[in-house]
Amino acid sequence: MLLKNTPSQSLFYSVMSYIYLSLFTIITITLLSIFFSFWITEQADSDAHAINLSGSMRMQTFHIGLSATHSPEDVQVLTAQLDATWHNPLFAQFENPQQIDAPDTLSGIFQIAYQHWFKTVRPMLVNQTSNAGQPDEKLFKLLRVQVDLIDKLVNHFQLEAESKIRHLRTLQLVAMLITILVGSLIFYLLKNRVEVPLNRLTEAAKSIRDGQVQQHIHIPGKDELALLAESFNQMSQSISDTYQQLEQRVELRTKELEQNNTILEYSFNVARKVLEEHDKELNYNEIIRKLSELMMIKDVELCLFTDKGERPYLHMDAANQNKPICEKGHCDNCKGDGPFNSITKGGFVYKYPVTHLNKQYGVITVRQAPGKMLVHWQQKLVQSSADQLAIALYLQETKQQERRLAMLSERTVMARELHDSLAQSLSYLKIQVTRLQKSHDLKKYELQQPIIDELSEGLSSAYRHLRELLTTFRLQIDDSGFLGAAEQSIKLLQ
């Protein structure tokens, strides 16, 4: 029976679901990696500008320090330029004073450098510039501190950019590893859950094509291919059962054909004997014995009636050839127009009359044990045998009638021949004897010699006619033809 799974179970165990999920995971990982890479690179786009600006602020600070000594009139312009750089929109995200609490971060370092410039260095620089005095050593120290802070800020901008690159590399490496793992899982599924089962199914299908219908495929799991393998096994078993049934049917039909062939051969032999040897006595014992062997029934009898039908004159039993002749006083119980059956204490009794042209010549009796009955082909075989025996007996009877008619015709011919030849010769001899008697009475002895000569010639002629008639009457041409008659004549002469 096929496994009956709910839709959720089928979806959960489905190979295609695994593949779809894996492909979705790969696509998701790829999209996420692309998104985060894009986001990181988007964040890193301003890092180079920030490093450039912070480096320029360091240069501007150096320039202000030099200008403070050599060109004080340029300090105000350079300070305004540096202020503008500090207030660049790129640094707007770092202008929160609260971030100074985290001095190790980029925002904290920016706020320290920012506050140091606007609250310490710039006021002192503006103050000294407005007083037109020479900058003192303290200002230069503050400027150096400012340069160091800006340099530290530049380094943190560089570290931040490098950190983003590292994060990008890490993200790409993790995405690559996950992609490799998911891809390996997909290859594993395709190899073990798709390719191998499909190869097994293909080999089994080829084996069935080559005639090896008994195939069994074991594919573990509850996915589509496992269900397909189980269906394939059921199909193979069904084909095998059908093939066995066909073989049994062919074997049964072969046996039936062999049996029918044997029956036809038996019927043909009986018919040939009936037609070819109708002038001879049939071997009824052999016919009944073969009939018993074909039917696989021992108790088969043949009873033939006399001409008047009073008592059987021939009684044969296939099981007991020496069985005595039936002692019944009459044959009324065996007469009938068609097959008739009866039930006795010993079982079933089947009787098939040997009938042809409304004349019954005998009966074939078949006895079966209780509970056993003749099947259709056995009844047909017995009926056919009875019909052929009836034809044989009819032909024998017809042959005997033809022989009687031939005998009567032969007697008529003999009488006509005797009358036409021998009777006339005897009449002629009788006349000559009368003449001889008259010549003796008249004592005309000179007339006796011619009469005696005529008597002698007449007797010779009569004797010759008699031998010719005897020779003619002895010639017989039977059914064997001229060759048989010649052989029979040669045997008589030997």
Image: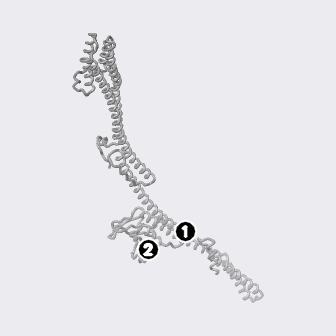
Which of the pair 145/234 is nearer the observer? 145
What's under tag 2, amino acid-wise?
A: Met
Which of the pair 451/292 is nearer the observer? 292
Instruction: Please tell me the numbered disc located at residue 276.
Output: 1
Relative height, residue 11 to residue 456 (above, below): above
Relative height, residue 200 to residue 70 (above, below): below
Residue at the spot of label 2: 316
Q: CA distance from mark 1 to mark 2?
A: 23 Å
What's under tag 1, amino acid-wise?
A: Glu
Q: Residues within 10 Å of mark 2 (few under 14, many from 20)?
A: many
Residue 24 seen in this snapshot: no
Instruction: Please tell me the numbered disc located at residue 361.
Output: none
Q: Quadrant of residue 470?
A: bottom right
First in residue order: circle 1 vs circle 2:
1
Query: In the image, residue 168 lies at what x, y percent?
Result: 34, 32
Drawn side of residue 173 relative to residue 118, left or right: right
Q: Residue at x 43, y 77 (%)?
A: 322
Query: In the image, residue 38 lies at what x, y percent?
Result: 35, 28
- What secondary structure is found at the residue carrying circle 2? strand
